[in-house]
């Protein structure tokens, strides 16, 4: 379950960021935007992020690499603290035009991929999928990735 509702939307396409932001604002999330992986990683390093909405195909740092480095950042933040009581993995929604079958998902310890939304879907279908994923997050129910 997400308590702070802090969302970071990472996409090199401004229109895609705005669409995802519109959907997440309608669910009363606090939304920050990043135009690429480098900017996202700086935010993750300095600020708490509960949900990462991540484009997969970005020019500077690929979504897969962004996840791997974010996992390393979170690992460093937790190092030396012992078992973190109440630690919640950062939830990730992959929001991309890449077909699900073409994704090479990384194995990460501190992030949990909870869903996939294809930007080529009709906006109504995207909104329904966002709604389903948000409900599953808030209820603590595990959702399948695809």
Image (cartoon, rainbow, N blue to C red):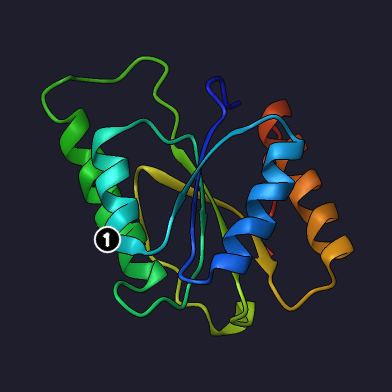
Residue 70: where, in percent of width, then height?
30, 51
Q: Is residue 61 left or right of residue 117?
A: left
- What is the quadrant of residue 26 in the picture? top right
Residue 32: where, in percent of width, then height?
48, 42
Residue that extends furthest to the top in the rendered view of this protein: 85
Vertical side of 3 occupied by 36: above or below: below
Packing grade of label 1 (10 A; few <14, some 14-19, many >=20) is some
Q: Is residue 145 visible?
A: no
Residue 102: where, in percent of width, then height?
55, 85
> Which residue is more in the foreground, 134 or 13?
13
Q: Is residue 134 left or right of residue 54?
A: right
Residue 35: where, in percent of width, then height?
41, 62
Q: Is residue 65 left or right of residue 86?
A: left
Residue at position x 63%, y 57% from top? 18
Residue that extends furthest to the right in the rendered view of this protein: 124
Residue that extends furthest to the left in the rendered view of this protein: 80
Vertical side of 15 occupied by 103: above or below: below
Residue at position x 31%, y 68% from top? 65
- What residue does disc 1 label? 38
Residue at position x 28%, y 51% from top? 41
Vertical side of 4 occupied by 122: above or below: below
Where, quadrant-wise, is the C terminus in this rendering? bottom right
Q: Is residue 57 visible?
A: yes
Q: How many marks?
A: 1
Where, quadrant-wise, is the N terminus in this rendering? top right
Residue at position x 63%, y 82% from top? 99
Classify mark 1: helix, strand or loop.
helix
């Amino acid at each position: 379950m997400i308590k702070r509702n802090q969302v970071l939307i990472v996409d090199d396409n401004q229109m895609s960021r705005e669409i995802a932001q519109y959907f997440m604002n309608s669910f009363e999330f606090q939304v920050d935007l990043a135009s690429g992986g480098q900017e996202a990683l700086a935010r993750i390093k300095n600020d708490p992020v509960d949900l990462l909405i991540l484009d997969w195909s970005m020019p500077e740092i690929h979504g897969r690499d962004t996840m791997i480095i974010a996992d390393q950042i979170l690992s460093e933040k937790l190092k030396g603290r012992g078992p973190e009581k109440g630690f919640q993995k950062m939830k990730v929604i992959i929001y991309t035009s890449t077909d699900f079958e073409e994704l090479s998902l990384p194995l990460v310890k501190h992030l949990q991929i909870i869903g996939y939304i294809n930007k080529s879907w009709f906006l109504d279908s995207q909104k329904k999928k966002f709604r389903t994923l948000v409900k599953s997050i808030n209820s603590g129910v595990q959702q399948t990735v695809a």
